[in-house]
Amino acid sequence: GAVVSQHPSWVICKSGTSVKIECRSLDFQATTMFWYRQFPKQSLMLMATSNEGSKATYEQGVEKDKFLINHASLTLSTLTVTSAHPEDSSFYICSARGNDRGPGQPQHFGDGTRLSIL
Amino acid sequence: DAKTTQPPSMDCAEGRAANLPCNHSTISGNEYVYWYRQIHSQGPQYIIHGLKNNETNEMASLIITEDRKSSTLILPHATLRDTAVYYCIVGNYGQNFVFGPGTRLSVLP
């Protein structure tokens, strides 16, 4: 159980393109999902917390108009990188936390999306 | 900043136990200890978590000291496929996870 699916796994596109990444919890409901970014040889950095039915909470320094997050259902959150540029190239990872599995329930992560902007 | 401190790297012989330490001296009473690992170009994989008691599952054992200021993840019989970066994180339901640099475990044949 606790499977998180992320799609696509790899995207290569031209500068100026907008790219949408999907994150789905396959076998559980998740009121809260998280979006991380990881640059080469670095650790994961939280970008934003996505809450079903409400606006996302962005970490300091993350542009909310650049990284649009939509969490329209209890099993799906999307991250759209708008007008992507080469500096947005990174490994984007989502995670989800189940609603009803106790106070210490862990986050479960997708396999990530490698975004390369040419 | 991460609330945990881990050694940057460790080696372990294949078939032997891998013991990965983590210090979390500022852990609060309601914070759990979580362990994840990340194999290159994949998302982090959940391993185990605990609050006060030692925990064991099919992947690993988690030993938490009585004062909860440190813990050890034990992989009882390490294989080459266990080579990864291991992250120790403390937090609870209402908190975001903060990832430190983790420990790069190399399992050697």
Image (cartoon, grey):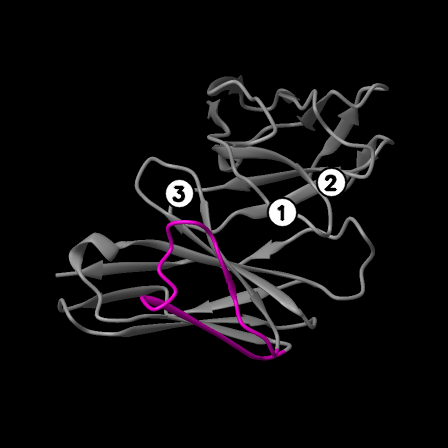
Report crowding for label 3: few under 14, some 14 to 19, many 20 or more residues within 10 A (C-alpha).
Answer: few
Query: Residue drawn 31% across and 66% down?
Result: A66
Amino acid type at circle 1 is Tyr
Q: Tell me the chain of label 1.
A: B
Give the mark, 3 or 1, whose residue is nearer the N terminus: 3
Q: Up-down: is B107 above or below B48?
A: above
Report crowding for label 1: few under 14, some 14 to 19, many 20 or more residues within 10 A (C-alpha).
Answer: some
Give x and y (percent) for residue B48. 71, 41
How far apart are the alpha carbons under marks 3 and 1?
15 Å
> Do the CB atoms of the residues marked 2 and 1 lie less than 8 Å apart?
yes
Name the secondary structure under disc 1. Answer: strand
Say which mark, if any, is on residue B49.
2
Residue A63 visible in the snapshot: yes
Give x and y (percent) for residue A27. 68, 72
Give the mark, 2 or 3, whose residue is nearer the N terminus: 3
Q: Tell me the chain of label 3.
A: B
Does the magenta run of residues contain A67? yes
Q: Up-down: is A101 above or below B34?
A: below
Query: Residue drawn 78% across and 48% down?
Result: A104
Name the secondary structure under disc 3. Answer: loop
**Residue that protrudes farthest toward the bottom in the picture:** A72
Which residue corresponds to mark 3? B40
The range drawn in magenta is: A53-73
Which residue corresponds to mark 1? B46
Report crowding for label 2: few under 14, some 14 to 19, many 20 or more residues within 10 A (C-alpha).
Answer: many
Give x and y (percent) for residue B50. 79, 38
Residue A111 visible in the snapshot: no
Name the secondary structure under disc 2. Answer: strand
Amino acid type at circle 3 is His
Query: Residue drawn 13% across and 67% down?
Result: A15
Does the magenta run of residues contain B31? no
Query: Residue drawn 73% across and 28% down?
Result: B27
